[in-house]
Every structure is written in C-alpha cells, then in structure tokens.
Amino acid sequence: MDLRRIIAIAVIIGVVIFLTSVTIYSGIWPPVDTIASESMTHSDYWTYGTMNVGDIVFVKRVSSVPGPVITYVVGRQTGFSTYGEYGNVILYKNPEGQTIIHRAMFYLSWADGMPVVQGFHNQSWMKVTKMYILIYDVGFSHRNLVVYLRGMVNESGFITVGDFNLAYRGIYNSSLNAYEAADQNVGITNAPVNSSNIIGMAFWDIPWFGLIKLNILKAYGQWPYSNEVAKNSYDYLFASIIIIAALIFLPYSKIYDFYRKRKK
C-alpha cells in the first residue's frame, strides 16, 4: 500500500472520529449551522474570535433553560465571554420558523408581578424596573441597551440581541440615552426564548467554509444576505481551499523516497 493511500485512509478515519465525537457531544443532528447574515458581526472585515457570515457554527443541545447557558449579565459579572462579548450565543426558532443565532443577554423570570433577572445584584451598570431593563455600556459599540417588557409579563426565558444589531440598528430612545435592539422588541421574535424554541448554544466554529453552502443557496434564490459577507472572507476561503488541495495532491511517495535516499 503506497503512502498516499495510507494518508487518505488516515484522514478519512480521522474525519469519521471527529464527526462522531462532535455529534455525541452536541446531542443534535446535524450538529452545525451556518451564519447567514451580519447580525452578529463586529466589523466590515472578517474578524478572528467573532461570528462572521459564512462561519460554520457547532451547536450543543440545551434541554432546559437557563441550564448551562451563561448570559451576558452573568458573564459580565464573572468575566466569561464568547465570540468577542460576554455570555453565550444561542440558537432558537422564531415564530416564522427561522433559526436565529444571537447572544443571550439575560434570563428573565417573574415574582409577584415584578421582573427577576438572573445574575442581577444591583450592579452599577444595570437597572431593573417593572417596565424595562437597562444595561449600560454594552458591546463593542459601548451603547446602552434598553429592553422593554411590554407583552412579556409573567413570561420567562432568554432575552436575546444580535451584537451587530445593537451596534448599528438599534432604535434610539433619547429619554434613556439607550437603544432598543432586543429580538423581543424589534420583531424578530415575540417572547423570551424558552425550552420550547431553543435549539442549543454555539461552542465552536469553522470560518469561511459555510460560504460554499450559502452560495449554492444563493443560486436558488434562498440567500438574500450575500452582500453582508465580510471583506477578506472569500480571499481566506480560496486560500484555504488551495492549501488543502496542495496537501491532498502532494507527491508524498516521492518526497519520502527523496529524504530516505538523503539519509543513506
């Protein structure tokens, strides 16, 4: 058996082991989703450590809430962050059946008609009232976020926000000097995210390669956000494909023979 065949078999076995391990850990099939829009991006350019259009995201099942999900509020208090900001990013289905990939800002519950925010301990950067929740200096844009609780009384679940949506699309409230950007306030969903509509939380990602799938969808008119791909993403994708192809087609046997002869 030649060296190329041995390497090919080893790669196939490695991929199978990897996919099996990820699926078992994830608890979901398929254990991945693709970032299709810019609602979580942090820059016009592809940025390491954040979510970018075309990234393939690995998802871990969440069977109960709040469960293992660390929200922005808890993360800001403890220093825990993912994808360039405090807290976990979760995936859920909105009423239209779309998969939304946004950050869990806080877990909301109620007691005697008053809102209860998990992790709130009268921090100076947060205010909780019966009508709204106000969080100061949020995200890479350092905007203040206001979440109005109208229509959510006695409903529990995660309040979610897209990082980009807060930074660039929020509705400004001059009286509070804050922006409405929560999914529950801007029409993305109509209620806190609870066990019935949460899919899971993001725990890892592969950059760029989701663009292959998205461009196939675009050919069928099913990807309306193609203009939101970060600059440099296609450059990185093509460079990665060239490197992988080069590794596949390298004349390993000749290289091996060459070095073996040199040792002699």
Image (tube, rainbow, N blue to C red):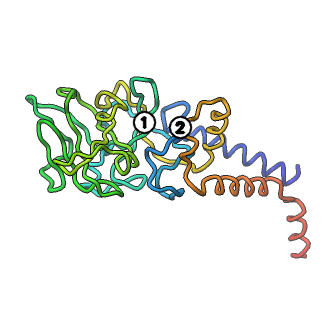
Which of the two residues, 264 or 240, is positioned nearer the viewer here?
A: 240
Q: Secondary structure at mark 2?
A: strand
180 vs 50: above or below: above
> Based on the displayed image, in which of its 4 quarters is residue 128 positioned?
top left
- The amino acid type, in three-letter code, at marker 2 is Asp
Which residue occupies 17% across, 27% down?
153
Say which mark, if any, is on residue 33: 2
Residue 175: x %, y % from top left: 16, 47
Residue 256: x %, y % from top left: 86, 64
Residue found farthest to the front: 174
Residue 151: x %, y % from top left: 21, 26
119 vs 187: above or below: below
Q: Secondary structure at mark 1?
A: strand
The residue wearing badge 1 is: 91
Position of 251 compared to 82: left or right?
right
Position of 172 compared to 232: left or right?
left
Residue 32: x %, y % from top left: 54, 38
Mark 2 Cα within 10 Å, few/some/many (few <14, many 20+)?
some
The quadrant the C terminus occupies is bottom right
Mark 1 Cα within 10 Å, few/some/many (few <14, many 20+)?
many
> Based on the displayed image, in which of its 4 quarters is residue 218 positioned?
top right
Which of the two residues, 136 or 61, is positioned nearer the viewer here?
A: 136
- The amino acid type, in three-letter code, at marker 1 is Leu
Q: Earlier in the sequence, mark 1 or mark 2?
A: 2
Which of the two residues, 172 or 228, is positioned nearer the viewer here?
A: 172
| Spatial CA span between label 1 and label 2 | 9 Å
Q: Are marks 1 and 2 in contact (CB under 8 Å)?
A: yes
Which residue occupies 23% across, 49% down?
178
Position of 11 compared to 22: left or right?
right
Which residue occupies 60% across, 40% down?
19
Q: How many marks?
A: 2
Position of 106 compared to 234: left or right?
left
